[in-house]
C-alpha cells in the first residue's frame, strides 16, 4: 500500500498492511507534522501526507503568556473579545496552511485538562470555538485533534469534527476502547492501541512561534 492508501484506509477502520505512522521527525512515515511556515519548503519523498501543526486559541494564548481563563474571569467582556481575536488568528492560520499545500491539520488542543481549566471553563468558553474552527474541513486527507495535558477531558472533545483523536496515553488513565465506544472513529496514539501511530511528539507546538500567526 502507498502511504496515502494506508492512511485513508486506517482512518476508515479498514485493514492495512501496517499501521500508518505520523511523525514530527525526519524518517520513514506516512504523514509528517510541520509548522505552517515551513509548508512550502517541505519536499515529499513519495506520497506522504503533510499536516500543519496548529494550536487552538487557548494554546496560542498560553504560548504567548496569556491566561485566557484569568482574563475571562476578571473581565468577561474583555476576555471574550480577546478569545475571539485568538480564534480569528487560528482560523487564518488554518486557511493559510491549506493554501500553502497542507493535506490536513495536527490541531493541538490545550485547555481541556484540570491543570488548565475546570470542566465549566473549557466547556463554557472554549469547546464550541474549537468545534467551529475544525468544522468544514472534512475534505482534508487527515485532521488529527491531539488533546494536551494530564487527564484531559476526553469526554468533552470526543465528538469534535476530525478524522482522528489523540492524547498522551502515558498521562491519562483513559482506556482507548472506552474512547472508541464514545467516538466511533480512529485514534492516533503513541501506543499499540492507536489506528495511527504517533511518533516523536514534541511537548510544545511549533506553530505558536510561526510568523504566520502574527500579533494580537
Image (cartoon, rainbow, N blue to C red):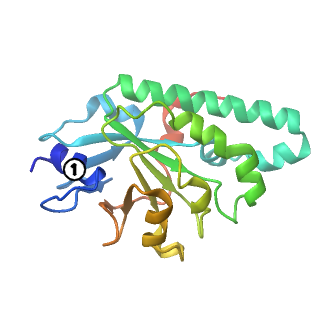
Label total for image: 1
Q: In terms of secondary structure, where does tag 1 sit?
A: helix
- Using the image, determine if residue 172 lies above or below residue 43: below
Residue drawn at 54 percent across, 77 percent down: 173
Residue drawn at 20 percent across, 43 percent down: 48
Mark 1 crowdedness (10 Å alpha carbons): few <14, some 14-19, many ≥20: some
Is residue 67 visible in the rendered image? The answer is no
- Using the image, determine if residue 176 lies above or below residue 211: below
Considering every residue shown, the one lying at the far right of the view is 74
Residue drawn at 27 percent across, 31 percent down: 41
Q: Quadrant of the C terminus?
A: top right
**How far across and down, in percent of the image, does residue 102 sit?**
33, 32
- Using the image, determine if residue 191 lies above or below residue 118: below
Q: Which residue is mark 1?
A: 9
Residue drawn at 34 percent across, 71 percent down: 193
Relative to 154, is 118 on the left or the right? right
Q: Quadrant of residue 81?
A: top right
- 146 and 14: which one is in front? 14
**How far across and down, in percent of the image, does residue 45 sit?**
13, 41
Is residue 66 visible in the rendered image? The answer is yes
- 131 and 182: which one is in front? 182
Relative to 151, is 73 on the left or the right? right
**How far across and down, in percent of the image, does residue 189 sit?**
38, 64
- Using the image, determine if residue 174 lies above or below residue 40: below
Relative to 66, is 29 on the left or the right? left
- 155 and 48: which one is in front? 155
**How far across and down, in percent of the image, does residue 62 sit?**
65, 48
- 78 and 18: which one is in front? 18
Amino acid at each position: 500500500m502507498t502511504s496515502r492508501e494506508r492512511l485513508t484506509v486506517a482512518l476508515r477502520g479498514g485493514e492495512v498492511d501496517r499501521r500508518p505512522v505520523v511523525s514530527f521527525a525526519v524518517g520513514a512515515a506516512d504523514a509528517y507534522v510541520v509548522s505552517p511556515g515551513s509548508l512550502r519548503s517541505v519536499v515529499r519523498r513519495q506520497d506522504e501526507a503533510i499536516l500543519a501543526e496548529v494550536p487552538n486559541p487557548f494554546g496560542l494564548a498560553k504560548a504567548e503568556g496569556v491566561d485566557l481563563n484569568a482574563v475571562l474571569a476578571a473581565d468577561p467582556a474583555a476576555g471574550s473579545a480577546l478569545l475571539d481575536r485568538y480564534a480569528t488568528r487560528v482560523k487564518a492560520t488554518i486557511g493559510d496552511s491549506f493554501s500553502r499545500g497542507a493535506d490536513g491539520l495536527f490541531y493541538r488542543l490545550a485547555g481541556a485538562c484540570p491543570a488548565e481549566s475546570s470542566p465549566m471553563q473549557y466547556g463554557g468558553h472554549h469547546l464550541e470555538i474549537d468545534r467551529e474552527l475544525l468544522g468544514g474541513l472534512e475534505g482534508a486527507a487527515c485532521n488529527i485533534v491531539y488533546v494536551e495535558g494530564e487527564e484531559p477531558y476526553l469526554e468533552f472533545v470526543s465528538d469534535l469534527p476530525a478524522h482522528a483523536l489523540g492524547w498522551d496515553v502515558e498521562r491519562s488513565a483513559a482506556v482507548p476502547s472506552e474512547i472508541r465506544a464514545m467516538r466511533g472513529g480512529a485514534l492516533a496514539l503513541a501506543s499499540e492501541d492507536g489506528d495511527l501511530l504517533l511518533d516523536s511528539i514534541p511537548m510544545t507546538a511549533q506553530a505558536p512561534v510561526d510568523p504566520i500567526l502574527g500579533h494580537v
